[in-house]
């Protein structure tokens, strides 16, 4: 299993994300995933830089590291044609080291222009159409597309790379896993759900499977629990809340019901390498080929130095 590092755009300022990517490369990580949000989950996280600008800076600051978005929503806030334009430029700047993670997004980020938040089945339908638009445009020819959800009129990406970036599709449900197998070059999920990985493979998915281990690196579990409860209570929120709530303050309201013990199992707490390894192994047993380590704490340099033992 290949171990990567998670760049959380909700938790770190733009320059810090670039510096953390450089540290991850120096530590021997092979890839990083970077989140694409316009809002943080809760106000304490405090950041939401424009991911494509950050990717440009990382491209010029690293030489070997592969980078993917985790994930970009090409449905509402950003038209898929613009996502294709951004992805083509990112692939060129990264000199082939970029891959495009796509998903159906969250209301938290997609309501901001006043658009309706569609039902889950409609969002999946929109994602399939968006992937079609993006793939066509990455081919570098003039394209006209008139679908049910999107229209493109005689658009050509003049800097489309010769080697288009792979498209990795996020999937937490069986129908999304089937879409990932049918339309994507890889699969992504933040839960170690072996059944969904199997659904992806059974549907013909042959690409890499990316996961995420979330933890809070701290001297002890008690300190880690308190930090994680303040900075990442959303990690312990189940169901469809992460897709449906509209504002950071809504997540904070739900977080009032989250206790430190609710984080156990969802977040690795502390600096015991055995516990971090157990969570990594859980993803490997579920069939994942890649996993990123995400520390919700505030000492990323120390965490990266700690985590390089798993690379």
Image (spheres, rainbow, N blue to C red):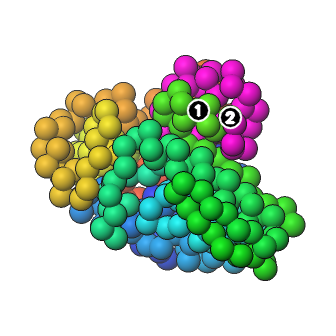
Q: Residue at x 55, y 49 (%)?
A: 127
**255 to 146, vertically: above or below:** above
Is 118 magenta? The answer is: no
Q: Residue at x 68, y 34 (%)?
A: 181
Callout 1 crowding tier (Cα within 10 Å): few <14, some 14–19, many ≥20: many
Q: Residue at x 62, y 62 (%)?
A: 146
Left or right: 63, with 106 as reference point: right
Callout 2 crowding tier (Cα within 10 Å): few <14, some 14–19, many ≥20: many
Relative to the observer, which residue lies in front, 194 or 75? 75
Relative to the observer, which residue lies in front, 222 or 230? 230
Residue stretch rendered in magenta on the structure? 182-210
Q: CA distance from mark 2 to mark 1?
A: 6 Å
Q: Position of residue 61 (x, y in %)?
A: 67, 75
Residue topped by disc 1? 177
Q: Element type at marker 2?
A: helix
Query: Which image quarter holds the N terminus?
Result: top right
Relative to the observer, which residue lies in front, 122 or 242? 122
**130 to 275, vertically: above or below:** below
User: In which image quadrant can residue 259 be found?
Assistant: top left
Is 187 magenta? The answer is: yes
**35 to 287, vertically: above or below:** below
Left or right: 199, with 190 as reference point: right
- Circles 2, 1 touching at the beta carbon (< 8 Å): yes
> Residue 216 — which label?
none
Residue topped by disc 2? 181
């Amino acid at each position: 299993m290949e171990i990567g590092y998670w760049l959380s755009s909700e938790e770190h300022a733009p320059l810090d994300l670039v510096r953390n990517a450089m540290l991850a490369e120096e530590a021997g990580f092979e890839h990083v995933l970077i989140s694409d949000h316009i809002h943080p989950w809760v106000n304490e996280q405090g950041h939401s830089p424009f991911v494509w600008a950050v990717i440009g800076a990382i491209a010029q600051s690293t030489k070997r590291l592969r980078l993917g978005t985790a994930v970009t929503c090409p449905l509402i806030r950003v038209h898929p044609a613009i996502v294709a334009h951004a992805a083509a430029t990112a692939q060129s700047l990264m000199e082939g080291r970029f891959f495009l993670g796509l998903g159906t997004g969250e209301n938290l980020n997609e309501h901001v222009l006043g658009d309706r938040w569609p039902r889950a089945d409609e969002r999946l339908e929109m994602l399939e159409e968006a992937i079609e638009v993006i793939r066509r445009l990455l081919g570098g020819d003039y394209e006209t597309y008139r679908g049910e959800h999107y229209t493109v009129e005689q658009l050509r990406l003049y800097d489309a790379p010769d080697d288009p970036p792979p498209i990795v599709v996020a999937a937490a449900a069986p129908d999304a896993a089937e879409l990932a197998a049918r339309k994507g070059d890889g699969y992504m999920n933040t839960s170690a759900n072996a059944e969904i990985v199997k659904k992806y493979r059974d549907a013909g998915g042959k690409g890499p499977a990316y996961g995420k281990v979330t933890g809070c690196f701290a001297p002890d579990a008690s300190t880690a629990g308190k930090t994680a409860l303040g900075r990442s209570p959303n990690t312990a929120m189940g169901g469809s809340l992460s897709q449906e709530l509209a504002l950071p303050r809504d997540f904070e309201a739900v977080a009032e019901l989250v206790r430190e013990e609710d984080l156990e199992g969802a977040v690795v707490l502390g600096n015991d390498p055995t516990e971090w390894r157990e969570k990594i192994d859980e993803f490997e047993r579920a069939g994942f080929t890649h996993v990123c380590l995400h520390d919700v704490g505030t000492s990323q340099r120390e965490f990266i130095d700690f985590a390089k033992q798993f690379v």
